[in-house]
Image (cartoon, helix red, strand yellow):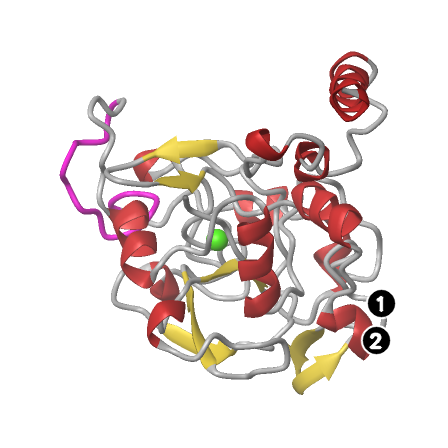
Amino acid sequence: MRRGFVHRWLVHEWLVHGWLRGLALPWLALGGAASAQPVDPGIDWQRLDGYEIARTETTVGQFRRHVQATGLRTEAERRGGGEVYEAGWTRKPGWTWHSPYGQPAADDEPAVHVTWHEAQAYCRWAGARLPTDAEWARAAYTEQRPKPPSPWQLGRSYRYPTGDSPQGAICLGDCGPQAQRLAVPQGRGLLRGAGHAPAGRSPAGVNGLHDMGGNAWEWVDDPPSSSSTRAAAGDDTPRRTRGGSWWYGEAPMRVEHRQDKPADTAVVYIGFRCVR
Ligand SMILES: [Ca+2]
């Protein structure tokens, strides 16, 4: 009885006063065994044909909830910082998921400097998973909404996640002036490119999704976890990234472009989004 009362009281406090919002709702669910369900930690989902995908790259604010709930200290933090490509790969002290260029990021910036393992762990915590390569590609290039707004056409596959042209994406040089204009100020000291924009700031593309092309590269589950040894942290099996980033022009935004990186890579260019 008392356990049930405490659980109801905690839920009430969360709903009415919000003082527990920094903690994960899965923790609350522990009070009622029958009600333990994965809880959506603020992800905006787009329904597709057979699955749902996040409309934006995972943000700093979303990733923070995961860190607060789990006590995670990321690989980039353990190593003293993530990396950027200058004259070769260069470690940057203090560059982490919450400070991508060494300064604290706004909550709507993409969470980068996360390894493939950390991305998958986040998605699982959120009751989701990383998309397979095929799922990511179908979401990025083939319109699946039953009644898509103009100019999108159900069933049509596009050359870019932005449609017939790369215009509107956050990429280097080929995608229009907004890439520079929307980039967060902390990225302006980079040797190449202007850095990422807040997630979801560029126009929605195929399937109403933002930044599938450009902004941050996105980890996908390829090779699939189910057909390979489930890697532990520290494993550096090559894993695929999709969509290109602000550091490249339009070419990596195309469906045929695939690039693999070691799973323990933590760099300023790579983020992710989840499916369920
Ligand atoms: Ca992206």
Question: Picture quarter containing residue 221?
Answer: bottom left
Determine if the magenta segment contains residue 160: yes
Secondary structure predominantly adopted by residues drawn in magenta:
loop
Question: Do the residues bearing badges 1 and 2 touch, measured as CB atoms within 8 Å?
Answer: yes
Q: Which comes sooner in the sequence, label 1 or label 2?
A: 2
Residue 240 is situated, as x and y percent measured from the top left of the image, at 41, 71
Q: Residues within 10 Å of mark 2 (few under 14, many from 20)?
A: some
Q: Which residue is mark 2?
A: 80
Res 246 seen here: no
Residue found 47% across the figure and 74% down from its top: 230
Q: Amino acid at mark 2?
A: Gly
Q: Nearer the viewer, residue 176 or 29?
A: 29
Q: Which mark is residue 94?
A: 1
The magenta-colored residue range is: 150-164
Magenta highlight on residue 115: no
Looking at the image, which residue is at 62% across and 36% down? 41
**Residue in view at x 55 percent, y 68 percent:** 116
Task: Work out whether 201 lies above or below 57.
Answer: above
Task: Identify the element where label 2 is drawn.
Answer: loop
For the residue pair 65 and 212, the one nearer the viewer reads as 65
Q: Does the beta carbon of the residue at mark 1 sit less than 8 Å from ligand 1?
A: no
